[in-house]
């Protein structure tokens, strides 16, 4: 009976932890994707040119990259649960400050919320590897679906909220404080009483954790993450502007981005059982890149079929996100190494991804054309095919 009670308590804790992880995931994209559809309004009121707007879009990604180097060490020192709790506090305060009407508010708020998101991005895969060792892909797919779902809602609702008579773009980007505040309340019990692993990892105790920086598989996973992130954030930040330039209304552009995220949710969830059954993920990685290549090439050649290409891009984005996040655990031997690989991949990934929206903005501003930006996106799609296929091979870091 005592063993049954312990099993029930453990199951209850894991169920609560899973719900809390999903709520954290819901906050890791929505504050970012809410900006793109109302970016023109932000530019108009704050006097931002194309380069300034591109930097506003790229700033979160640079912060993701820099803090990804320090997040694993913070997680080991202060526990994963407590650092993620601090991350939720930063997201909540940052989202609120960003929507305020004082000089520099949008920059200060963006820095704060981006710092919080960076910590959550890196540490959640390690937490899942530690506590859901036999169900890593499933839990990752659930929180990735939450990321995509609320990212889609944030993009789809941004313009309608700003068009309400008594509201403007500040409400569109600030209302997500409610979501992060709720997630923080749910996370508080974990923050106060963090779960520690019962058995110390032997390799860590001996100082023999193999660094992903010294292994090809670490670079392959990282570059896969980098190129698909570059495409994702470029589409989120600039599709609405591109869509308006080809005759699509801002409201319809926001709806297309909602469809983009909804398709990503479906593929997020669909990938989990596929990953679990696969001996390796080479063909899945190849498919991720093909969907992205079809979408980027199609948007450039046949923009009148934008909805079709957005669906293809959504499929590629969803599959790429779940697959790359799952690889953090699948290519590592324990949760410490998973956090290290996550930190490496997200440093390289978001550094590369940060260049994407900024480069798109600069190329478009100076060329007055969308040709150069789409050359970048098409090239990145080809890189996803290459590195996702390599990262999908059944290898562990250090083997």
Image (cartoon, rainbow, N blue to C red):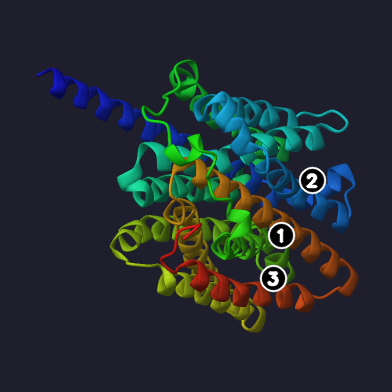
Q: Which residue is mark 3?
A: 247
Q: Is residue 302 above or below residue 186?
A: below
Q: Secondary structure at mark 2?
A: helix
Mark 3 or mark 2, earlier in chain: 2
Q: Is residue 227 above or below residue 258?
A: below
Residue under the image location 44 percent in, 44 percent down: 334
Nearer the camera: disc 1 or disc 2: 1
Q: Secondary structure at mark 1?
A: helix
Q: Which residue is mark 1?
A: 352
- Binning the other alpha carbons within 10 Å of mark 2 as few (below 14), some (14 to 19) or many (20 upward) gives some
Residue under the image location 81 percent in, 31 percent down: 105
What's the CA distance linking mark 3 and mark 2? 21 Å
Left or right: residue 329 versus residue 212 is left
Percent x, y of residue 302: 62, 82
Q: Which residue is mark 2?
A: 42
Mark 1 or mark 2, earlier in chain: 2
């Amino acid at each position: 009976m005592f063993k049954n009670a312990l099993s029930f308590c453990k199951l209850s804790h894991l169920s609560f932890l899973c719900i809390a992880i999903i709520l954290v995931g819901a906050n890791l994209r929505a504050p970012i994707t809410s900006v793109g559809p109302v970016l023109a309004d932000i530019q108009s009121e704050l006097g931002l040119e194309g380069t300034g707007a591109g930097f506003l879009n790229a700033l979160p990604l640079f912060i993701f990259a820099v803090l990804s180097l320090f997040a694993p060490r913070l997680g080991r020192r202060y526990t994963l649960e407590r650092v993620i709790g601090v991350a939720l506090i930063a997201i909540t305060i940052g989202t609120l400050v960003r929507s305020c009407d004082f000089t520099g508010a949008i920059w200060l708020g963006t820095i704060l919320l981006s710092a919080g998101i960076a910590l959550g991005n890196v540490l959640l895969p390690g937490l899942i590897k530690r506590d859901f060792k036999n169900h890593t892909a499933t839990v990752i797919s659930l929180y990735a679906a939450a990321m995509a779902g609320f990212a889609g809602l944030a993009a789809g609702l941004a313009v309608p909220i700003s068009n309400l008579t008594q509201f403007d773009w500040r409400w569109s980007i600030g209302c997500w404080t409610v979501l992060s505040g709720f997630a923080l309340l749910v996370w508080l019990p974990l923050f106060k009483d963090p779960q520690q692993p019962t058995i110390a990892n032997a390799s860590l105790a001996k100082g023999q954790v193999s660094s992903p920086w010294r292994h090809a598989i670490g670079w392959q996973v990282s570059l896969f993450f980098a190129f698909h992130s570059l495409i994702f954030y470029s589409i989120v930040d600039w599709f609405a502007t591109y869509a308006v330039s080809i005759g699509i209304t801002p409201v319809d552009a926001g709806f297309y981005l909602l469809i983009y995220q909804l398709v990503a949710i479906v593929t997020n969830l669909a990938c989990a059982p596929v990953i679990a059954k696969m001996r390796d993920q080479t063909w899945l990685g190849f498919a991720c890149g093909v969907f992205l290549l079809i979408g980027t090439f199609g948007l450039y050649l046949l923009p009148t079929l934008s909805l079709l290409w957005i669906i293809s891009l959504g499929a590629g984005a969803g599959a790429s996100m779940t697959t790359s996040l799952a690889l953090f655990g699948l290519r590592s031997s324990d949760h410490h190494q998973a956090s290290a690989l996550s930190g490496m991949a997200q440093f390289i990934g978001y550094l590369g991804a940060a260049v994407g929206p900024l480069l798109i903005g600069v190329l478009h501003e100076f060329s007055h054309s969308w040709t150069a930006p789409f050359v970048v996106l098409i090239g990145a799609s080809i890189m996803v095919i290459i590195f996702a296929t390599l990262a999908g091979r059944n290898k562990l870091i250090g083997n």
